[in-house]
Amino acid sequence: MTNDKHPIVDLRSDTVTKPTPRMRRAMAEAEVGDDVYGEDPTIRRLEETAAEMLKMEAAIYLPSGTMGNQVALHVHCRPGREVVVEARSHIMNYEMAAMAALSGLLPNPVYTEGGIMTAEQVEASCRPDIYYLARTGLVALENTHNMVGGRVMQLDRVREIQDVTRRARIALHLDGARIFNAAASLGVPVHEAAAGFDSVMFCLSKGLGAPVGSMLCASKGFIVEARRVRKMFGGGMRQAGIIAAAGLVALEDHVDRISEDHDTARKLADELSEVPGVEVPFYPESNILMCRITDQWFQKDLPEDGDAASVFVDRLRERGILALAINSRQVRMVTHFDLPENAVGRTINAVTSGR
């Protein structure tokens, strides 16, 4: 399915990128120590860099974005509290009910038309202080929003929600797994996209291209407690400067080029929308493209079970293109810096020939 002339076009996620040669050199040469004892200088430098970029007091390095979110929820909330989240958010759907299993928290999902909560919706979802109601412990936003096509939350909308949580004295967390994509789309420095949140998680292993790791940024006191919770959740690491070195290179080399992935996603969306039977409900605002596969795409062999997305993805795979079926009709494609130069053209050829 692949060779030097025609490598696989992997659009399943931006997590599939391989470490760059400079990352591999940095990893091989990294100065390390035991991070559980706070003695790994490379991790300390990564944490300081992340905090400085987001203009927050401190940061902690974690193995994954899910752990970063869950550590934040545990520090912010007592058991028995509710967490207000958008209904299609990652925290709600793709973190194994960890807020309930690990922290005794209950999600309070807000159902939105386009994936972006309003201040009015957040205010209505925060519980009044009545003894027989669970208290709202946290509001969590996601920017960019993965499952609605990488949509970007505009900063005026964010500031309105921040006003609500500030008045209600409720903490506000940002699942900013792709916050650098959000900042690039908004045309602002990343610290502006992070401003006003009590805690922010972002991933090094997505559009930034590092092989592993995420950062949680907040106040110094919050991060002290986050370090204890990370250990409790099994996330204490030893000589992890070997992988943290790649995260430093990601922050040095890959922030300024993220908008190139957005351009590729838009070009792909333009081409896909011309194919009969492929609908693009949200024009890409970042590097994620969602498309809907209708019956019209099938010139033959319409699946009896109606699982059009799986058949679509299977036929693309046969032609060297990897994508992700989200449900029976929806397919996700994510652009990133490891795509071959002719990725868009090859993808469109596979979509048209696979019919």
Image (cartoon, rainbow, N blue to C red):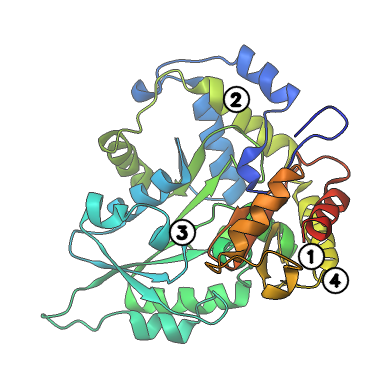
Q: Earlier in the sequence, mark 4 or mark 1?
A: 1
Q: Earlier in the sequence, mark 4 or mark 3?
A: 3
Mark 1 — residue?
269
Rendered residue at 37%/73% (across/down): 109
Mark 4 — residue?
274
Residue 311 image-quadrant placement: bottom right
What is the crowding at mark 2: few (fewer than 14 residues within 10 Å), some, or many (at least 20)? many
Rendered residue at 33%/77% (across/down): 168
SS assignment at label 4: loop
Q: Position of residue 270 (x, y in %)?
A: 84, 67
What is the crowding at mark 3: few (fewer than 14 residues within 10 Å), some, or many (at least 20)? many
Mark 3 — residue?
90
- Residue type marked 1: Ala
Mark 2 — residue?
245
Quick one: which residue is furthest to the left in this view? 131
Q: Are marks 4 and 1 in contact (CB under 8 Å)?
A: no
Say which of 154 and 70 sits in front: 70
Distance of label 3 from label 1 (alpha carbons): 23 Å
Distance of label 4 from label 3 (alpha carbons): 30 Å
Distance of label 2 from label 3 (alpha carbons): 27 Å
Q: Earlier in the sequence, mark 2 or mark 3?
A: 3
> Is 99 situated left or right of 114 in this image?
left
Say which of 346 and 25 sits in front: 346
Q: Position of residue 201 (x, y in %)?
A: 49, 50
What is the crowding at mark 1: few (fewer than 14 residues within 10 Å), some, or many (at least 20)? many
